[in-house]
Structures are given as C-alpha cells and as structure tokens.
Amino acid sequence: MFDLNERGRDLREWSQQMKRDWDERARQDAKWFINTGRLQQSDAEFDATGEREVERLILADLDLLTQGRDPGSLRLLEVGCGLGRLTRPLARIFGEVCATDVSAEMLRQARARLAGVGNVTFHETDGLDFAPLPSEHFDVVFSAYVFRHVPSAEVIYLNLCDAFRVLKPGGALKFQANTLTTFDYGEVEKDTWVGASFPEAAIRRFAQEKGAQLISICGGGSPDCWATLRKRPQVASAQPQYAVARPRIEDFARADSPQVKEVPRSGPGAALALLVSGLIPDEVDANTVAVEIKEVEAWPRYVGPPRRGFDASGEAWTQVEINIPVGMPAGEACVRVRLGPDEASPPVTVALHEPRPVVPRIERVSNANDEGLLLLVEGLDETADTGNVRLQVGDRIIKPSAVGSSPRPGVYQVSAHLPRDLRPGATELRLFFGNIGSPGAPLEIK
C-alpha cells in the first residue's frame, strides 16, 4: 500500500519523537492528554470515562468481537494503553490483556495505577510494530484514540500490519483512525498530536490486501472513524463465493429505528439497514457487497449479523447498512444489493423523505489541543463542512478547521483553533449551520 523506502524522513525518527513527546505529556498532565475533558482530573473522574468508553466500544459489540465465545477465555491486545484508562475495565471482561504503549513514562504510571490487576501485562513498543509479541496470539486487538496522534500514515499502516500478524485466525481487530481528507486538514502540519489522516479508502485497501473480512467502517471522512476487521481462518480462494443463492432483500428499515420504514434523505437518521438472504455470512463484507440506490452505488458501513432490534426470525440473514448518499432526492427509491455487475437482488422500494429543519445542539465541548476545541454536535448533516459551519465565541466568529461525522448516529465532530488573543474567562459558545444557530453553551477560556 505504501512504499516505505520513499519516505524522506526516517521512520525511526518518528518513533523517537513519539516517545519523547508522550513521555513529556505524561509528566505534565497525563490524564488531560489522554482524555481532554478537563485539566487535573481525579482518578475517579478519569477512570469513569474509561468505563463508559469500554461499555460503548466493547460491550455493545462483544458478541461480534468474540463470535459468541466466553471473553474470559480470550486474550486481548490493547494498542496505546496510556495510563490504563480502558485497560482496567477491559481486564474485567477478558481473560488476559496485554497493554502496550510507546511511552515508558505512561507505562510506569499505568503499572502503578493497576498494580493489583493480575491479568494485565504491559509492553513498551517503538510505535512502529509489536515485536517481539508472538504471531497469531491474540483473539482481539483493540486501539482507541491512538492513531489520530500518529504523524505518518505509513506508521499507522505498519501498526495495522503487525496488529494483524499477532491476531489469531478468526480474531477481530477494532481500531479508530482519523479519516479526514479535506483540503484544510491536509494543509495542517502533522506531528505527534495533530496526526496524519488514514482515509476510509486506505482502510478498505488494507482489508483487501490482508484478505480480511471488513465488517464495519463507521464515521468515514471524520476524525473519529471506527473499523472492525476479522482475520479469515483461511485465505480466500482465487474465485471466492459470496452467495449460496441469488441475494434477496427480505426486510429493510431506518438503521437506527428498526420499526421505521421511511428514511430521511439527509441529516440525522439518514441510513438504511437491509436484511438480506442468500449471502454467505463468513465471506461477504463491506468490500464485497454494494448497494444500489436510485442507480447510485454506495459502499456499506456495516455487513454482518443482524443487530439488536432487527428480527431475522432465526434465518441465516445478513444485515447490510449504508448511509444515504449525499444529494439523494426525496421520493421513492429503487434499492438493490449487488455482488458484482451481473449479480444483484430483486429491487425493493424505499421511501426517502425530506428531513425537518433541525436546530443544532452542542452536546459536548472538550480540548482538541492546547489552542483548540473539539465539539460533538447534533443537528448537522452530511452537507456540513468548513464552508457552512461557524463558531461564535463571545463576539468572535471562528471558522472550524474540520467538520465530519462520527460513529454515533446523528452526531458530528467540529474542530477549531482558538485565536491567541481571546481574553481568559467565562464566555458563551454557539455554533451556526448555515443561518441556524445552536443554543449557547458555557465555555471557560484559560
């Protein structure tokens, strides 16, 4: 995927830079650099955020990640453990946890914090791979909020390759990456805090290169994209089979509301879930199934077992989810599932409706970096970008540096750099999407 020999900067220099920078951050205020909600967090406050993250990212997907096996009998590799914010709750779920980090100082503090947890081992890495961990050793590999701080796409690629090496056949790799491809973000100099983009297309190519089953890829085009891949027990044949019969759409609904058949053409909830028969669940994935909607082809964000709330009635059906393509008009839409140019399901008709105007709402504000903000916002849609979104801090209007979707349905991320001359103190923050402004949210400038 990458020609590593053509890089002007030695990858080992990046390794040493990551170690130096994260060691220094660990000494300054490790909790803030890991969870940028507030400076000087207490242990209880800090650890509570880890509990919530593990519940959302692991427990909600546990059957998918473990294939129904007892997690207490499985080994998990955590990439970028920091102070063990997620490690402690992960250790209560899995039989063994190997927690890795590039920073020796982070690991020193993590060992002290988790001294009484007997099923966790810590391992310092060079930030490029997981040597000397054994091949095909872990049942699950998990990385949260790490690769977005990696300054080189090649370094991210090397980490993913070695994570795949240490994963057992049949095991799952779940990771988060920044997939922004906007011009504005491309112009920002990358370092060990504002990391490189690893676009959705690169994740899809990586899965194809490794012969992996790409189960889900949610939040593509945003700073917070989550992907889940499974290492196939054996390499697919030269002519793999993906269906036992002609695919057929047995049922459909709005992806976040299984009982609702109509889907908004844009905005929150603009995603369609299809229950499809005839597919081979262990073979098909988000790279081999496509959905045609009004003759526009869309690649799925999820291809896997039916999710909670969708009734498969005991049938061997596969759930396929897509985001409604940008610009799709309201009205009846002819929808098909395709496995190739000559293999498609009979069509079904899905009603797309015009969404109601939504007032944006700032759900959460946190520090993106020393001079920036990261907002979670409801009420935006896929047309939101740095051209039609503005922030108002007090009486100052600020253009965001990035706007993108997140894996959470209906929630978008907005990043912005704050002007250096803003006065310290309490003020109000508002967000404007076009001409519609959000209610104010309190903001403390320090």
Image (cartoon, rainbow, N blue to C red):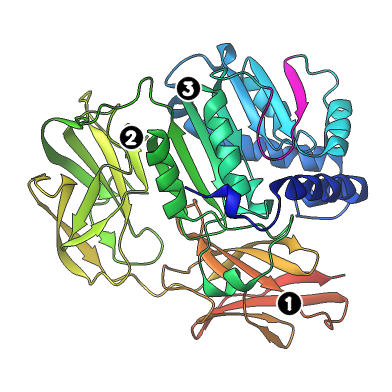
- Circle 2: element type: strand
- Circle 1: element type: strand
The CA distance from mark 3 to mark 1 is 45 Å
Residue drawn at point x = 74 percent, y = 68 percent: 372
The question of residue 131 being in magenta is answered with: yes
Q: Which residue is mark 2?
A: 304
Q: Which residue is mark 3?
A: 66
Q: Quadrant of the C terminus?
A: bottom right
Kind of residue at disc 3: Thr
Residue drawn at point x = 21 percent, y = 27 percent: 313
| Up/down of 301 relative to 443, above or below | above
Query: Do the CB atoms of the residues marked 2 and 1 lie less than 8 Å apart?
Result: no
Relative horizontal placement of residue 182, taking residue 249 as reference (left or right) = right
Relative horizontal placement of residue 112, taking residue 244 as reference (left or right) = right
- Circle 3: element type: helix
**Circle on res. 428:** 1
Region in magenta: 119-132
**Most frequent secondary structure within the magenta stretch:** loop
Nearer to us of marks 2 and 1 is: 2
Within 10 Å of the Cα at label 1, are there few (<14), some (14-19), or many (20+) other Cα atoms? some
Asked which quadrant contains residue 132, the reply is top right
Image x and y of residue 256, in percent: 37, 49
Within 10 Å of the Cα at label 3, are there few (<14), some (14-19), or many (20+) other Cα atoms? some
The CA distance from mark 2 to mark 3 is 13 Å
Kind of residue at disc 2: Gly
